[in-house]
Each structure stands twice: as C-alpha cells, then as structure tokens.
Image: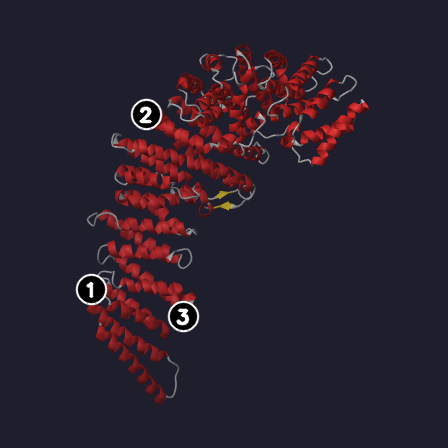
Amino acid sequence: MDYGAAALLIFGQMAKQGQTFFLEEWLKTNSGAINNTNVTQSTPQSARAIIQAWADLRESLNQKSFSQQHYHSLQTLIHSGNSLYVADPQVKLVISILSASYLSLPSESYPLFLRLLYIWVRKSSKPSLVLVNSSINVILQLFSSQSVTNKSALFFTEGILLLGAFTFVPSTSEETRTQCLNLLCKLLEQDYKLVSLFDDLVPSVLAGMSYALSSCGSIHFIQILDFLFGIWNKEGGPSSSVSHGLMVLHLVEWVLYNCIQSQSFEKISTFSREILESSNARYAPFSVVMGAAGALRASNRSISSGLMELRSSAEKRIEIIAHDLISKNVNEVKDSVLLQCISLALARSGDALSRDSFLLCLASALLTEIFPLRRFYSKVLDVHINFSNIAVHEVKEHLQSVVFKEAGVITGVFCKQYSQANEGSKTKVENLIWDFCQDVYMSHRQVALMLQGKNEELIQDLEKITEPAFLMVVFFALAVTKQKLSPNIPRDIQLDISVKILISFSCLEYFRRMRLSEYMDTIRAVAGSVQEDHMACVSFVESIPSYGDLTKTHVSSNKMEFTWSKDEMQTSRILFYLRVIPTCAECIPTSVFRQTVAPILFLYMGHPNGKVTRASHSTFVAFISSGKDDDSERVLLKEQLVYYYMQRSLEGYPGVTLFEGMASGVAALVRYLPAGSPSIFYCVHCLVEKASSLCGEWKELNDELEPCKKLLDLLLRLLSLVDIQVLPSLMKLLAQLVVQLPEDGQNMVLNDLYAQVSDSDDVTRKPALVSWVQSLSYLASQATINSAPKQDPQLEKSGAKSWSKGRLVGLNRIFARI
C-alpha cells in the first residue's frame, strides 16, 4: 500500500489552504479553532537566534547538565513555529539528549523535544529510516518509563501526535508501525482524560489519530475509530463542541479521501459498517453526524462509482439522527451542539438528498442557534441579570462563531430543502419563520428602549445578527413564493402566504440596509397577489399597528421619553405599509381606510423623516384617486380627508412637509374630487392664505422666499387643473394675492401667467384667463403706482404715464400673440 503517494495527494490539497505540513493546524483552520497552545505559538526568530539555540542544546551534552538556559533555548526553537526546519543532525542531537541517562530534564521540556521530532518527520520529504527507528525507540522508552509517564497533558498530546506521524511515514517497517499503533491505542485507552484538561489539545490528538487511521491495518482501524467517536461520551472525556465536531468532519474527510486515493476500500467499508450503518449508544451523535458529513465530502471529491453505498449510508445516518432529534421537544441547551453540527454538516457536505427531518432541523438551528435573538433578548430584558456583563460577552462570542459566519451557506441549504419538502413540513416551517419575525420586531424594540443611551454597543452587536437574519427571511420568502404562488396552489393559500410575507417583511424592514433584487422580486410577487383580492388587502391593512399603540409614549432606562417619531424600528415598519398600501388602495374598503389608515397617514405626515412624509402623501394620493365616482361613501370620505390633509400639510410647510408631496396631493384632490366640491374651494383658500402669510415679508428675490414662490407656482398650475366652477374663485383669490406683492413679485407672477396662458390649448378656459390676466396686469400696475413714494405731482404724473405706457406696450404685444 503506497501511503506516501496518498499523503502527497492529501497534503497537496492542504497546501492550497496554506497548511502544508501539519494536519492539526489544518483541522484548526477548518474548524475555526483559535490557536492558544504554548507549543504552537509562533514568534519570528532570527537565524542567529536559532543557530545559537541549537548550539546551547549541544552544549548541554558536553556539560552533562540541562540548565534553565538550555530550556529557554529549546523554547526559542519551538517559538519559531512553522518557519523552523529540523535537519537530521539536529534530530540526532534531540535523540541523544532524550537518551542521555545522566541528564535530568525538566518535565516541561519533554513535550517540546517531541514537537521538534514532529516538525522533522512532517517537513522531511524522506526521513532517514535509521533516525525514524531511533526516534521511535526513544519514544517507546519514554512512555514506558515510570519517571516520565503522565508528566503532563501536553506530553501525552505530543506523544499521540508524534506516534501517529511516525506511522504515516512510508519507510516505517510494519513491525515498528505496529509498535507505534499499540502504544497510541494504549495511551488513548488509559489517559484520554488528559485531553479534557485543555480544549486546545484536542486538535493535536485528533491529528495523531488521523495519521494512524490512514496507515494502520483493519484491527487498529476499528480500535481508533471507536476512540474517535466514543471519547466524547466517556466520563472525563473532552467536551462536545461545534469546533470539535468540525475537526471530526475534516478528519474523516482526510482519512477517507486518503483511503480512496490509495484504494483502501476495505477501510471504507469498515468505516461505513462500524459508524454509519450501525447505531452505537457509546458514540456521541454530534460526532457521528460530522463523521458522516466527512464521508460525504470525501465521496464528493472522487469520481469513483463505487462510493455510492458510502454516500447513501452517510445520508441515512444523518437523517436518522435528525429525525430522532425533531421527534422530541428540542432542548436549546442540551441539543444546541447537535443542532449546529447538523446544520454545518449539511452545509459543508454538498448536495444532500431532501429530507423533511433535515428541513425541520435546519429551521430550528437557524432560529435558535444561528440567529439566537430570542435568547439574547430574553437575557437583556431579564432585570435580574447583569446583561452588561453576560449578554454582551455572549453576543460578541456568537458573532465570531463558525455557525454564524456560515449562516449564508446554511440558509441556501435550508431554502433548497424547503423547495423539495412535503406540504406539511413546508407549512410548519413557514409558520416558524413568520412567528420569528413578529418576535424579533416586538423584542428588539423593547431592548432598544431599555438600552437607549445606556449600552449602544450591545444594540449595534445585536443588529449585526438581525441583519443577516433579515437576509435569511428574504431568501426563504422568495423560495416560498416560487413554491406557493403557482397556478396549481389554491387561491386562498396563495393569498394567505402573500399577506404573511408582507407582514413579516414589515417587521424586519428596519434591518434592510441594502438593495436586494430577491427582496424586490418577492415584494412584487406577493403585493401583486394581494392587490387583486379585497379580503387579502383588508387582512394586510388591518395588521398595521393601531394609532394608539404607535403614539404610546415610553420612557427609556435613562428616563428619556421615547415618542413615536423617535422609534426608528416602528417608523420603518410604518414606512413599509405606506409604500405597499398605494398598490392596493382600490381594494381597501372605505370604512377600513377611515378607521385604520387615515389616522396613521396624517400622523406620519408630520414625521421628520422625508421618506416617511413622502410615502404618506403618496398614500393619500392613491386613496383620492381610487374608487368610482358613484361610491358616495368613498367620495364623502375623500372630501372629509381634504380638510385634515390641508391642515396637516400646511402646518408643516416649510420644514417637515415636502412641497413635492403636498403638490401631488393637491393635484390629485383637484383632479379626482367632484366638480365644485367644497373641499376644492377649501384647498384653494388654504393655499392662498398660506402663500399670503409667507410672502408678507417679500422685499426682494432671494432664497428665503423659495417656499412662497413654490406655492405661487402651484396656484398658477391650478388654473389649468381646477374645474370651471372653482376657477373664478381661484382667479379672484390669486388676483388679491398678486396685487399685494411688491413690483418684482408681480412681474415674476405675471410673466409666468403670460407664458402659461399663451401655451394653453384649453379653448374653454383660455378666453376667461386672457381677460383675467389683462385685468390683473392693470390692477397690479395701479397697485404699484399707488404704493410708490410721494413726489412732485407733475413728475409723478409724468412718470406714471411713462411707466404705464411702457408696460402696456409690452402687454399688448403679449396679448396679440395670445
């Protein structure tokens, strides 16, 4: 069996990921583990320092004494980390020191010497067989010596790692390899509890087992597999964790792919039989799930058709464990690691077959482990807990977790599993997601209120979780629309799903920080479905928070009042409704709009956020333009709303009210209300009155008068929009306003009027407008003369005639063109 060739292939793959020599480092990288062990901390050392360190160690043999200085030199070499290369002469030196009976070595030095031998055997392309055998003999003697055995957990770990590495050397004889494997199995059996002392030691132990599994015979293969999957449930064994599970996953992938490359199909069959096809209560479920995922990854990397049985067994084993988990009430504390491991196993193992148990496990994992917002909110809101110390630490720790960083991949697998699940499981998962959205909205608002001005950092960290949670909901909702908004699905189900998606999106709108095509596609699909059905529209509109709930004043933890206009999350939700409601305004009953929408529309018309006020005006326009003229109840409500609309708009202008929004509202009510409606007269009166108050301080053309100019422009545009019954009143009020303006203001208005009337094609109102403009021009000229400073009567008369003559000449030319 060519183990060397297989090893080169495996480490060729590892080299692409930056871990060329050391399997334990590769396992750490793929599991997200943090390297904190003393033996692997790396500090760059100069070549001179390394040469001097070797010289110091050599001097210890000459002096027949191993001092503290020699130990520091040994540490210098180890701290060089991956940059250190150990050649054969240095190996002979290490062997000599370990074999010297006259040297009294400190116990903490043994793991470091073993690490030097490990670096040598892993970095050497073809280790000397003589030195390999000599090193192994020294190791066997060390572990058989009562004076050295059980020196430390680190010594045990380095021993397992080195023994495994020696078995992986192609030139090692079968006899020597067997000796190493026997000792490795003995140490695992007797001293496994040492691994649990420090989690950072686990990668090295697993790496040693990996080397051994790739090179051993069937007997040792079964023994080591038993240790690998059974150690987690043993008394005093290492803890179950996600990082350990990921190490198992990639360990199994590495070993099985090695077996595939070396055509050791007997081992693959043994693994499948012992781990995948049989259930063993001694094995921790999380490790079996990750082992099965590793088998799937290994099979995915090979084109061999003989691996279908392995793949089938692996998927079946994950399915059995997932089914057992969801068949009971999932305990968030007890089953946390298993849920996370199942989700990561499915995410990292490629395209697994669709199973309902997979879908439900993924849903549970996403809502409780990947986005554990409910748990965090609960801790923050619990007044008996010092959330500043506990919740802050837990949230930051979660943000760095592997499962959170892979939320996107897991969401993709989740959506794919959903698309192929049965209807019962789909409905169950849908309800879980929609309920999650409601809970996040309610709880996040409470947490924001509690932490307002007290712990802004925690709010920001929580929102780093809610933002990807929002993305998860968006992609899931898109998958739902593709499945449920299709012709073969009953109409009532389509409408129910559409409404629930809209409500869920409204709850999480605050966390939408980017433009997503998936979001827009989903909105278009569900909004298009809802706007075609009256009942669905009513259901969606009535889900909006009530006016009373919106205006309820809260007091934050630092005694600050938390009013409706300062509640950003609530505002985002209302903004969502105000953007969607115009698309279905035709289907909203008059009574529902009066009771539910109108109060909120006018409330948020005074919001300081321009986007919100603009959306409020758009909603008003949509309602005014909706319905038929013969619907007396709807027409009556429209006319009633105009009074509130003008009052609310003009009291905030200029400032809060956006002119463009108000202008669109005025244009809509003038166009869609019945001809001669008192509401239109009221609208014109209010606009003139507001313009008069704004233009009262008009001294000269400047930017400060821009609001007044805009209102004048709007009034001029109304001349061509209002019906004939309202036009006389508008012309009268506008004339009264114009003659009160200073000369430059009058000229500006008259010039605009001249241009507007001359371009008009309205044969009905144009004659009246021409006559009116002539009269207005004359009145304006008289007002200007009367308001001029008193001079010499003769000069005043002469100047007036000259001024009037010049102005009238210009007017005659314009009216000739008209």
The residue type indicated by label 1 comes to Asp
Q: Nearer the viewer, residue 460 or 770?
A: 460
Tell me where residue 146 sits by quadrant.
top right
Residue that label 3 marks: 701
- Which label number is shown at residue 762? 1
Nearer the observer: mark 2 or 1; the answer is 2
| Left or right: where 787 falls relative to 337 | left
Q: For the residue labelled by badge 3, is the local secondary structure a helix, a strand or a loop?
A: loop
Q: Position of residue 590 (x, y in %)?
A: 27, 44
| Left or right: where 121 falls relative to 94 | left
Q: Residue furthest left?
A: 763
Q: CA distance from mark 3 to mark 2?
A: 69 Å
Residue that label 2 marks: 423
Vertical position of residue 685 compared to residue 426: above or below: below
Q: Nearer the viewer, residue 130 or 644?
A: 130
Q: Nearer the N terminus, badge 2 or badge 1?
A: 2
- Which label number is shown at residue 555? none
Q: Tell me, yes or no, if residue 709 can be seen here.
A: yes
Q: Tell me, yes or no, if residue 246 can be seen here.
A: no
- Colour setting: secondary structure
The residue type indicated by label 2 comes to Glu
Q: For the residue labelled by badge 2, is the local secondary structure a helix, a strand or a loop?
A: helix
